[in-house]
Amino acid sequence: MIEDDDGLMPPGFNGDEFVISGGDLKYFHYEGEFQFEFNILNSQLLEEVHINFYSPENGLMPVINNFLKLLRYTSDVPTLTLRNALCLLDMPEVVTQVPMFIGVRRLELDYETSDLSNKGLLMMLQNIPFLESLVFVEGIKMPSDPIEDDIWDPLPPCFLFPLYFIYVYIKKGDVKELMGVKVLLENAIALVEMEIYFSELVNKDIRNNFCVELLKLPRGSRHCGIYIRQ
């Protein structure tokens, strides 16, 4: 694991960038503010990347290029986890430069709440054509009356095939979360399983009402099963 820490710089740091020789490296975990560039050599065996972004005090603009460069090294990694990175993805300077993630099969978004109207998130999904599993670790939301009704047009190719599994964490059981689930269910044509996990803070009545409304939602896939966890 690499962290931005002025007091501890791991081998490979030359003052401007980290140079990492992949070799047998299968797992890469970065936490920090993207103060430096990364150059990962021989990363063919890399199986999983976890990026945990800390927002820098001097703003987001200075770190955009470093963030994008690291993202490019993840394009062939089967499992990609992004934590707190949606604020970067939604920046106009980033949206137009999001790379293609040809090798990614599983995407985990670990954020306070993933906004399904986030243009950067949608662009990223557009660029993961072979995504099979999509995990929203800290929940989702979708405005009940979105300003742009066609924001999910065109549909990300993976929602037509092969996306078969979606995990959603429900924090409140409110309308915005229900609308988010609705968008996912309607558009994931090849979906086989959606797993809903309720926070222990959601009381029984709210949970039951949410489930009642959930079962009324249209599904793009006739073969999709919904599994409730709590």
Image: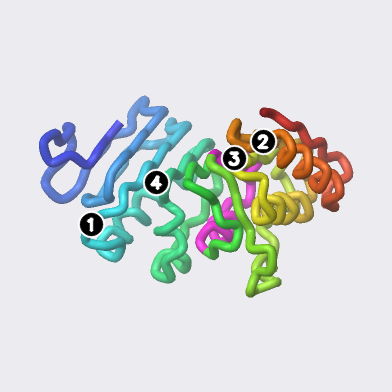
N-terminal-most mark, 4 or 3: 4
The residue nearer to you, when weighing 197 against 101, is: 197
Local secondary structure at mark 4: loop
Horizontal arrangement in the rendering, residue 211 relative to residue 17 (left or right): right
Residue 127: x, y in percent? 56, 56
Query: Which numbered dot is residue 73?
Result: 4
Relative to residue 110, is residue 85 depicted above or below? below
- Residue at 69% across, 63% down: 144
Q: Residues within 10 Å of mark 2 (few under 14, many from 20)?
A: few
Nearer to us of marks 4 and 1 is 1
Q: Is residue 133 magenta?
A: yes
The residue nearer to you, when weighing 40 against 37, is: 37
Nearer to us of marks 1 and 3 is 1
Local secondary structure at mark 2: loop
Q: Amino acid at mark 4?
A: Tyr
Q: Amino acid at mark 3?
A: Val
Image mark count: 4
Residue that carries the numbered disc 1 in the rendered image: 57
Give, as a single range, the part of the protein colored magenta.
120-137
- Residue at 42% across, 48% down: 84
Q: Residues within 10 Å of mark 4 (few under 14, many from 20)?
A: some
